[in-house]
Image (cartoon, helix red, strand yellow):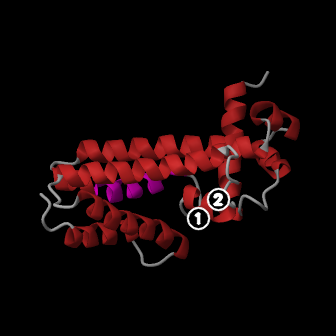
């Protein structure tokens, strides 16, 4: 008998690969199930819907990203290095992440219309959570690094971070996280 956790992991892996290489809207659950070596019935048994599958792919991705950022923060030797660790985390995350064109959260946001007012959307909630984590952490780290205006520093770093993620899709410039890290140093001269 197949291990349900292994089946679930295979389905998540397949969905992540197809959703973020080919697109969410154009990827049918039949293709996900086929790539995972299972049936559509099994996919629905585990997730109930394509939306739930997407939500779980993003939740797993957010957990993995946060772990990489936490590890980069732990390696940082100073408050300024902790502030810049987001760019180090991008590099380590990308080295381990499955094949995707770029950021799964930005890809999802670009493919989905906003939820209607008053309608609960668990996928949109995860997109918001990712943004909240990134912006909140950057602001706290900017404050810890001694930036005179932590919110402005966090906003500038968020722009650089988003630029890194977009550059991964575009394929240029090369090594965007390293380049953004250097640019960030010019944005936070009063820090550290």
Q: Which residue is at the far bottom?
A: 173
Residue at x 42%, y 44% (from the top left corner): 66
CA–CA distance between discs 1 and 2? 6 Å
Q: Give the mark count.
A: 2
**89 left or right of 32?**
left
Q: Quadrant of the N terminus?
A: top right
Residue at x 71%, y 42% (from the top left corner): 53
Secondary-structure class at tag 2: helix
The answer to whether residue 96 is visible is no
In magenta segment, residue 94: yes
Residue at x 63%, y 58% (from the top left corner): 108
Q: Looking at the image, is mark 1 or mark 2 earlier in the sequence?
A: 2
Please name the residue that numbered disc 1 is placed on.
101
- Please state the extent of the stretch shown in magenta in the rendering: 84-97
Q: Nearer the viewer, residue 121 or 42?
A: 121
Whole-percent x, y for residue 10 in the image: 69, 39
The answer to whether residue 87 is visible is yes
Whole-percent x, y for residue 109 in the image: 61, 60
Rendered view: 147 above or below 189: above
Task: Say which mark, if any, is on residue 186.
Answer: none
Secondary-structure class at tag 1: loop
Say if mark 1 contacts mark 2, CB within 8 Å.
yes
Q: Nearer the viewer, residue 44 or 17?
A: 44
Q: Quadrant of the C terminus?
A: bottom left
Magenta stretch: dominant secondary structure: helix
Whole-percent x, y for residue 5 in the image: 67, 27
Q: Which residue is at the far front?
A: 118
In magenta segment, residue 160: no
Residue at x 68%, y 63% (from the top left corner): 111
**17 left or right of 79?**
right
Please name the residue that numbered disc 2 is placed on.
20
């Amino acid at each position: 008998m197949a291990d349900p956790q292994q089946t679930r992991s295979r389905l998540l892996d397949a969905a992540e690969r197809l959703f973020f290489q080919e697109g969410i809207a154009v990827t049918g659950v039949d293709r996900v199930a086929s790539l995972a070596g299972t049936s559509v019935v099994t996919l629905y048994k585990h997730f109930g819907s394509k939306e739930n599958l997407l939500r779980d792919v993003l939740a797993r991705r957010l957990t993995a990203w946060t772990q990489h950022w936490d590890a980069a923060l732990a390696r940082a030797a100073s408050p300024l290095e902790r502030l810049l660790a987001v760019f180090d985390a991008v590099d380590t995350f990308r080295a381990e992440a499955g094949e995707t064109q770029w950021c799964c959260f930005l890809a999802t946001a670009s493919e989905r219309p906003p939820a209607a007012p008053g309608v609960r959307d668990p996928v949109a909630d995860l997109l918001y959570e990712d943004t909240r984590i990134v912006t909140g952490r950057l602001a706290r780290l900017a404050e810890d690094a001694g930036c005179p205006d932590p919110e402005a520093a966090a906003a500038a770093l968020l722009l650089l971070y988003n630029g890194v993620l977009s550059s991964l899709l575009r394929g240029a410039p090369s090594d965007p996280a390293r380049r953004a890290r250097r640019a960030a140093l010019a944005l936070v001269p009063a820090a550290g």
